[in-house]
Image: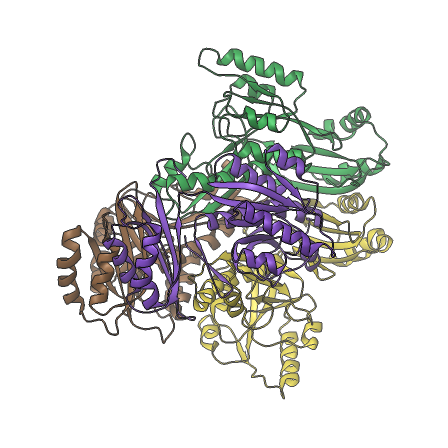
Chain colours: A purple, B brown, C yellow, D green
Amino acid sequence: MDKDTPRTATLLMHCPDRPGLVAGVTRFLAEHGANIIDLDEHVDRSEGQFFMRVRWELAGFALTPAAFGEAFDTAIARPYQVTWQLHDDGRPQRMAIFVSTMSHCLYDLLSRWQSGEWPVEIPLIISNHETLRPVAEQFGLAFHHFPITPENKADQEAREIALLAEHQVDFVVLARYMQIVSPRLIEAFPQRIINIHHSFLPAFAGARPYHAAHERGVKIIGATSHYVTEDLDAGPIIEQDVTRITHRDSVGELVRKGQDLEKLVLARGVWAHLQRQTLVYRNRTVVFS
Amino acid sequence: MDKDTPRTATLLMHCPDRPGLVAGVTRFLAEHGANIIDLDEHVDRSEGQFFMRVRWELAGFALTPAAFGEAFDTAIARPYQVTWQLHDDGRPQRMAIFVSTMSHCLYDLLSRWQSGEWPVEIPLIISNHETLRPVAEQFGLAFHHFPITPENKADQEAREIALLAEHQVDFVVLARYMQIVSPRLIEAFPQRIINIHHSFLPAFAGARPYHAAHERGVKIIGATSHYVTEDLDAGPIIEQDVTRITHRDSVGELVRKGQDLEKLVLARGVWAHLQRQTLVYRNRTVVFS
Amino acid sequence: MDKDTPRTATLLMHCPDRPGLVAGVTRFLAEHGANIIDLDEHVDRSEGQFFMRVRWELAGFALTPAAFGEAFDTAIARPYQVTWQLHDDGRPQRMAIFVSTMSHCLYDLLSRWQSGEWPVEIPLIISNHETLRPVAEQFGLAFHHFPITPENKADQEAREIALLAEHQVDFVVLARYMQIVSPRLIEAFPQRIINIHHSFLPAFAGARPYHAAHERGVKIIGATSHYVTEDLDAGPIIEQDVTRITHRDSVGELVRKGQDLEKLVLARGVWAHLQRQTLVYRNRTVVFS
Amino acid sequence: MDKDTPRTATLLMHCPDRPGLVAGVTRFLAEHGANIIDLDEHVDRSEGQFFMRVRWELAGFALTPAAFGEAFDTAIARPYQVTWQLHDDGRPQRMAIFVSTMSHCLYDLLSRWQSGEWPVEIPLIISNHETLRPVAEQFGLAFHHFPITPENKADQEAREIALLAEHQVDFVVLARYMQIVSPRLIEAFPQRIINIHHSFLPAFAGARPYHAAHERGVKIIGATSHYVTEDLDAGPIIEQDVTRITHRDSVGELVRKGQDLEKLVLARGVWAHLQRQTLVYRNRTVVFS
């Protein structure tokens, strides 16, 4: 983010498709002094749904967030049955990271934060192992260890949720966190928990995807970042990418090559979320560009 | 193109950026009964230019093309200094193909036409060699041979231009046509001649790019489709793609692998043109998606 | 294939891994006057198997194919328990094509044959529909129509197998042939039937993969060429590739983009087979480069 | 590197192509008890050069490095005019990193070292700025600041070379080091200085490649890792990769997307070097797989 980027707001919305929606929203914004700098809309004809992302400069815009809500509801949201979110792009989002023992994604996320590449705050890192505490400490970040057993899982997650709330966390990144998160945590952060799965979903869902890929003899491996839902590895996909492999690659080589993919695909997924480019509808993610 | 796709029109426009443009255009369209099915806009902040592509259903739209021109000029184009094109998407475009001796791109284009994949008509094929006449005839298409020498080049091109006009050709595809086309032909089809260059431009412009790529030892080769301008291999790029090579690949292998790229990149470039997704501004191409 | 390429032979072999295999084979070849121009070996450590592909110039090589077999069996194959194939690279292979109603892969294969890109002969095209007869005829190729019903399937396939034998077909390409081929045909051409599946296997095996991909909301689609085995869509993979899609792409757009992938991935798979680069072991394909 | 990987040695060699080379070398190794676990050879027919990489287990191998040299010179290297290097794969290589002010590649390299992903030691980091000292210190590494001016450049580089020698550095990585290194430093580390250039070379050599790419309107950007030679940005390429961009991407977006490429392409180049997969010949790099 350039320092001289003008302060902006972003509106994400979807509703049943009807003629006049773009005209209606853009006229509403123009009437209140918005200078639109980015507008992307999409109509899913098979679903009959309209999706839009609009970003405008706040300088000259007449409405406060509260006033916007009231006016937009009256003029647009209620008549058109719109589901919407408004974001002040100038406020850094607060991201919690969950890890287990593998460090590659964690290093990548922390580097992007520390170097200022991402406009994000990291109030805490949570893990079910002590392994990565030194990495967190090296970057000066709080590290909370919550060992998980079948017996204590519900209690530990309740404490995690309380901690996330206490730190006003906006969203959670599972950076190769090797635990299934429970419905309670998912409900606390609907469409705000991002996971990285180390395969090209839906291929090789579940455990040990690199072993499965090697066994099947595929010529390409992939990684997938997605929002977490109760249905394991089946949440709405944000980003995927792949890399070519050959018969020469052992499972160990797949793991090595795959880790570079995981870093990249998770980072792109988080970036899309940070940029308010994502809108989930019926288990699919619209990713505005 | 699905048979039951509704009849649509596409507007491509650009102008100096000013607040209210999207609102103004979409309101104009809504007032005349347009149901917008696709809208994509782009602001190039470094150039201060606004670009937009809007597609709407013609069913229920109140304006004929002529009436649209008058009304749009008055309401939008003159006040905002807009350059615009309106296209009736239901009319198949007429494409001429120029070839020399290599057949791979020609086969690919003709297959897409003959199978009905592309809504396009091919009134004629022009070549400076007789080599590919059998391919044209096999597909039942007219083939015109214009041998080119330094002495006859101007005359032959004048005859070609007349022939293209006679056949009401909308745009020209140079499918590995190994002749430099003259300014006169370019002026007759501004931003309507598409060339395929067998390298990842601007690397390896000019002749024998695969030899140059092999000599340089690159690990990736590419192809580029672009609109033809008087500045050779420097016209606005529509599409590029690449493929990985290794030290094992001889120049012959680069040619073989590259030809698959050329077919694909040319086809994608032509498709974007056919879909009215391209807008040229200052030697760059906006390609709406 | 360059015209002045020297005449070569290719040996493909695999056996349990033991020290001295490369030395043994290369010494054997050198002793009989072979000038090796390409050698690639691979040891699958998890399987304990050794794989090798060697290509040498026939000029100066002392052994006829028959004499090679006897000498190689004695010196190498029996002591090391080697499974091997020897190919005379100068003999064009005879390829049969099976199609149904979609033409994109067929056009691509026929173009590569007719332009001389591939050193292959096409004695016949077989289809369960009449639809593509005009394409075959346009390219001057024999087209045999075998309509398939549950009742006549066994008989029709028996006739197809007889026809393939009569035409001395070396291998079969299923170019979007929408019929499951029976074990009898597979046994007649073990590891010599190549299919293109329109997904990134193992994701979206079975029917309608583009619909399934759209429903799941993936961000990348793929295609897979593989040898056909009795286990549907589960045969050894030769080649895969992918292309990026977005939420904007309807099922129809996935089909359109996917068809370009299918052409390319099938062509690469057939090319690898033609070049004797493939060796199947336990449902995985070693593809030498 | 798995802990239970057997101790191996790697031989890299090239020489004028002659029949019997593979047989000669593999017989030599077999006679001294080598169990070859990987062999890759390449003949560059246009250059008439033979290249080979062989890796074997040291357990059971009869020759010490010194004895190998003597025996190999006598049996193979002198008769065949072979240029060769022998590496003990068990010894971690010592890597120095040069940086300026951008941290993304540095973080990536240090993470791979600290996590144990790479079998490498980092005795020191050198910079012409103080900016990244905190990153080095955070990872517990020595950081040496050598400010460079036109006047002091020769002296400073002499001190750098002395420092590198003192720390027994094997190779140097320029991780976005924004200074041209002098011939003296290059001569001290021939084919052992790896640079990352932030474009798809040879396109956009020199300064500000992202600005140039934006100006030209390319649809794909790239990054290149290469060995440093006296000819700026023209050294032998080890690895390249690309990413797709659109007209929506500002120069700032190209920089952001490009940095992810730079990290990946530099890491892959360093990995190939660490694995002894690279052999330079006439400004091209053979990269064995």
Residue D136 x, y percent position in the rendering: 59, 26
* Residue at position x 52%, y 11% in the image: D155
Residue D269 x, y percent position in the rendering: 59, 36
Q: Nearer the viewer, residue B280 or C115?
A: B280
Residue B12 in view, yes or no: no
Q: Residue furthest bottom?
A: C151
Relative placement, left or right, of C127 versus D204 is right
Relative placement, left or right, of B170 versus D197 is left
Q: Quadrant of residue D36?
A: top right
Relative placement, left or right, of B17 versus B98 is left
Q: Nearer the viewer, residue B16 or C161?
A: B16
Give above or below for B111 relative to B260: below
Residue A64 x, y percent position in the rendering: 32, 49
Quadrant containing the N terminus of chain A is top left
Residue C105 in view, yes or no: yes
Q: Quadrant of residue C154?
A: bottom right
Query: How many numbered discs, if any?
Result: 0
Residue A127 x, y percent position in the rendering: 66, 45
Give above or below for D25 relative to C173: above
Give above or below for C288 relative to C200: above
Q: Nearer the viewer, residue B51 or C256?
A: B51
Relative placement, left or right, of C33 versus B93 is right
